Amino acid sequence: MRLAVVGAGWAGLACAVEAVRQGHAVTLFEAAPHAG
């Protein structure tokens, strides 16, 4: 499954990491120039 996570704050990053651990392909979107 492919997932998109909108927002690279702490919650978005945690969600993306867990999804990758479960075998999903993740695309992370962030409007700011830096994640976190």
Image (cartoon, helix red, strand yellow):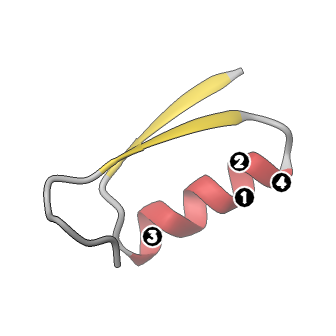
Question: Whole-percent x and y of residue 2?
Answer: 63, 23
**Residue highlighted by disc 2:** 19
**Residue highlighted by disc 3:** 11
Instruction: Give the left or right position of residue 30, taking residue 32 as reference.
Output: right
Q: Secondary structure at mark 3?
A: helix
For the C terminus, give its image quadrant: bottom left
Q: In whole angstroms, how far apart are the C-alphas of marks 2 and 4?
A: 5 Å
Q: Which mark is residue 21?
A: 4
Residue lying furthest left in this view? Answer: 32
Query: Above or below — where is 33 with respect to 36?
Result: above
Q: In whole angstroms, how far apart are the C-alphas of marks 1 and 3?
A: 11 Å
Q: Which mark is residue 27?
A: none
For the N terminus, give its image quadrant: top right
Q: Secondary structure at mark 4?
A: helix
Taking the spot 30% from the left edge, 56% from the top edge, the residue there is 7
Of the residues tagged 4 and 3, which is closer to the observer?
A: 4
Sequence-earlier tag: 1 or 3: 3
Instruction: Give the left or right position of residue 35, taking residue 18 as reference.
Output: left
Taking the spot 25% from the left edge, 72% from the top edge, the residue there is 34
Sequence-earlier tag: 4 or 3: 3
Q: Secondary structure at mark 2?
A: helix
**Residue highlighted by disc 1:** 18
* Type of amino acid at the residue the image marks with label 4: Arg
* Type of amino acid at the residue the image marks with label 2: Ala
Q: Are marks 2 and 4 in contact (CB under 8 Å)?
A: yes
Residue lying furthest right in this view? Answer: 22
Q: Are marks 1 and 2 in contact (CB under 8 Å)?
A: yes
Instruction: Give the left or right position of residue 12, taking residue 25 as reference.
Output: left
Instruction: Give the left or right position of residue 8, taking residue 34 as reference.
Output: right
